[in-house]
Image (cartoon, rainbow, N blue to C red):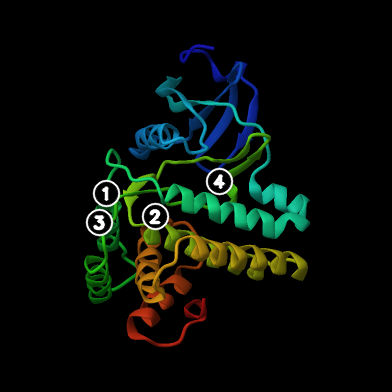
């Protein structure tokens, strides 16, 4: 198909909150976005940077293209379930998957890049826009950020099982829209926040206990394995977690648990108790 062809001729593979994925040609898929935002161009660049670094990501076949009035990106087709789907179908693979995911994330963090936007600059801007926090708290978080290293490694910033495909070729990382250069702990803190909200969401909907326990095992194993591969200072990680929770108030405005994130930031800044400070 050509970029000007009607999408009605293409077979829909998957639907998500930000984009739909269609069969586009032999061996290729089209990720067609619902809305136009600047980060779509960054997804093209970040995916190409990761691919050129020989990381397991789909190849970008075209840059941004126009299909009707929508923007899209053509990628190499990768078949397989997400890691989330794979684990829930084969729960006995939980620890193996968690270790492989951690190893893959650590591998990404061994890749230094120069072409991508600076994560620390984006975080600084985001903290200033975090309206759920009062100004003095935002300033305190900015002080925390200013004391942390900028870093030069490749950061995915949305690394979790939904963005990992379990293919016949191995694990493939998708959705690089937020790909930047920065500190590995900044990226890890973002994954930590996702894990907390993931587990909190399961608890909130009263998911079966075995399902909750399964994902608790996944995240515990994941962080333990990552720490083995890339040891880090726990105090530094707390600082990055404060930043991640604050910026998520801008990056994920529609996501539930705003009160939980706000209370965590205030507790961490004030050295008071909070459930999320225990791990």
Which of 175/248 is in front?
175
Q: Earlier in the sequence, mark 1 or mark 3?
A: 1
**Badge 2 element:** helix
Which of 250/160 is in front?
160
Q: Earlier in the sequence, mark 4 or mark 2?
A: 4
**Badge 1 element:** loop
The residue pinned by badge 4 equals: 163
Q: Is residue 141 above or below residue 249?
A: below
253 sits left or right of 115 in the view: right
Which of 117/138 is in front?
117
Residue at 64 percent across and 62 percent down: it is 218
Q: Tell me the distance, in whole angstroms, between the alpha carbons under discs 2 and 1.
A: 16 Å
The residue pinned by badge 2 equals: 251
Pinpoint residue 60: horizontal percent, then vertical percent: 46, 26
The residue pinned by badge 1 equals: 118
Find the residue positioned furthest to the bottom.
272
Q: Is residue 275 above or below residue 72?
A: below
């Amino acid at each position: 198909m050509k970029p000007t062809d009607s999408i009605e001729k293409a077979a829909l593979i998957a639907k998500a909150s930000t984009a739909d994925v269609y069969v586009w040609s032999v061996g290729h898929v089209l990720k067609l976005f619902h809305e136009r935002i600047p980060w779509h161009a960054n997804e093209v660049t970040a995916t190409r940077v990761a691919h050129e670094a020989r990381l397991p990501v789909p190849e970008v076949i075209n840059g941004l293209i126009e299909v009707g009035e929508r923007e899209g990106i053509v990628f190499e087709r990768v078949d397989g379930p997400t890691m989330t789907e794979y684990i829930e179908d084969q729960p006995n693979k939980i620890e193996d998957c968690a270790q492989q995911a951690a190893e893959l994330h650590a591998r990404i963090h061994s890749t230094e890049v120069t072409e991508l936007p600076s994560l620390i600059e984006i975080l600084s801007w985001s903290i200033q826009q975090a309206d759920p926090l009062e100004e003095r708290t935002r300033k305190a978080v900015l002080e925390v950020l200013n004391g942390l290293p900028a870093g030069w490694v490749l950061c995915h910033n949305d690394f979790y099982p939904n963005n990992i495909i379990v293919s016949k070729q191995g694990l493939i990382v998708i959705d690089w829209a937020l790909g930047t250069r920065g500190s590995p702990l900044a990226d890890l803190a973002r994954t930590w926040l996702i894990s907390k909200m993931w587990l909190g969401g399961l608890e909130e909907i009263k998911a079966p206990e075995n399902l909750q326990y399964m994902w608790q095992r996944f995240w515990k194993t994941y962080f333990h394995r990552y720490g083995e591969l890339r040891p880090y200072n726990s105090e530094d990680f707390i600082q990055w977690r404060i930043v991640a929770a604050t910026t998520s108030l801008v990056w994920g405005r529609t996501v539930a648990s705003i009160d939980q994130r706000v209370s965590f930031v205030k507790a961490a800044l004030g050295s008071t108790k909070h459930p999320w400070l225990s791990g």
